[in-house]
Amino acid sequence: YTLGIDPGTGKQIQKSVYGKTQKEVRQKLTAITAEIDSGMYQEPCKMTVNEWLDIWLKDYQIGVKDSTAYLYERQAKLYLRPALGNIPLETLKAHTVQRLYNSLSQEHDGQPALSAKTIKNIHGVLHRALDMAVRLEYMLRNPTCACVIPRVVEKKAEPLDAPEQKKLFDVLRGEEFEALFLTDIFTGMRSGELIGLTWDCVDFEHGVIHVEKQLCQVRKKGCRFYFGTLKNGKTRIIEPAPFVMEVLKKHRADQQAQKKRASDLWNEGEFPNLVFTHADGSHLNQWFVCRTFQSYLAKAGLPRHRMHDLRHTFAVNSIMAGDDIKTLQENMGHYSAAFTLDRYGHVTPTMRRESANRMQAFISNLTTESG
């Protein structure tokens, strides 16, 4: 049927309408004609998922970190385009997407199953892309909203206990990166924040460290390093134990002497004034720091730990030392105290017992005075 002229394009609108009865067909035609007359009619989108992903990745990543945008492109290339790319947006159904998620969670043709976290990330990319398509009225609804994804089980935090810390400290003494790892374990800074820390952010006068940026690299061949924003976008101030500031003072003196000896060979490159560098002044990267950490653990006869476990160690030490959750949240740079409590709630039984003991002492004082 030719139903009229599309006011947006000026083209004739032709529509095939199907129904079980003539009455049903007339009702559908009447509804479409009413949309045309009111100017609300929109031709069905003819774009495929591939075509929309091209547009979304190119035009709708404003404000997204370069590293995040690269991960979006990679997830789309490896998983979304091969399975869904040729499907028209308007015909993409939830069960089609669900089958993709299910297949990714299983071993197939010698390829290992993807982790629940990876599938969640893939789902996140597709959901964001289709959500924008819905907002632009290219789709009526987002089919990913009806999908079920595997439950992600958080990796258990494995902080170093006191004996392990003692062994690590003994090995670190006098080592090239002693200051870096001591600062990490006593401030809880992320590795990107540590290698991106500059001396202008270390305030010796007031005994604080301003955490304002991190050194990043897009995981793409040929991409350069750059100073990026923090994980949650919020800068923070850490007031570490005086011991840490003394470690950094000594490290600064050592670095200045090293720079003087290197003379023209000192190579700061695009990142001058870094606190932690290679022997020639060049910047570190997270892979190198993690590998170095593993070598120190092996030398100390300790089991393998992730670099991030030093951050967990700081959190546990802080709680055991009596820090409240709100203070710990601010030092760690978490987005909420609830997240901090949930992450480290297993450390609090001792704190609860100490609280009960303090309350008992308070009650005993009250009853003694009233008696």
Image (spheres, rainbow, N blue to C red):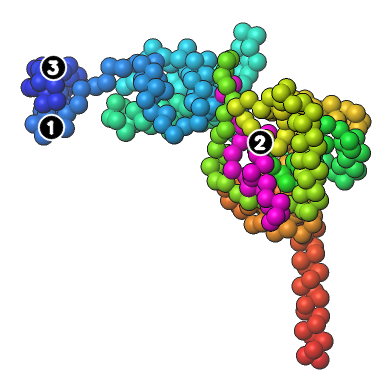
Whether residue 207 is visible, yes or no, is yes
User: At 76% from the left edge and 73% from the top edge, which residue is drawn?
Assistant: 359
Q: Could you tell me which quadrant the C terminus lies in?
A: bottom right
Residue at image mark 2: 273
Q: Is residue 146 magenta?
A: no
- The type of residue carrying mark 2 is Asn
Closer to us: 212 or 353: 212
Give the tally of numbered discs. Answer: 3
Horizontal side of 17 relative to 53 (left or right) equals left
Number of other residues with Cα within 10 Å of mark 1, as a class: few under 14, some 14 to 19, many 20 or more: few
- Picture disc at residue 14: 3
Q: Is residue 198 magenta?
A: yes
Which one is closest to the eye, mark 2 or mark 3?
2
- The type of residue carrying mark 3 is Gln
Q: Position of residue 221 (x, y in %)?
A: 58, 15
Residue at image mark 1: 39
Q: Position of residue 119 (x, y in %)?
A: 56, 26
User: At 66% from the left edge and 36% from the top edge, which residue is drawn?
Assistant: 273
Which one is closest to the eye, mark 1 or mark 3?
1
Q: Position of residue 323 (x, y in %)?
A: 73, 58
First in sequence: mark 1 vs mark 2: 1
Q: Position of residue 187 (x, y in %)?
A: 73, 46
The Cα atoms of the two marked residues, 1 and 3, are separated by 16 Å
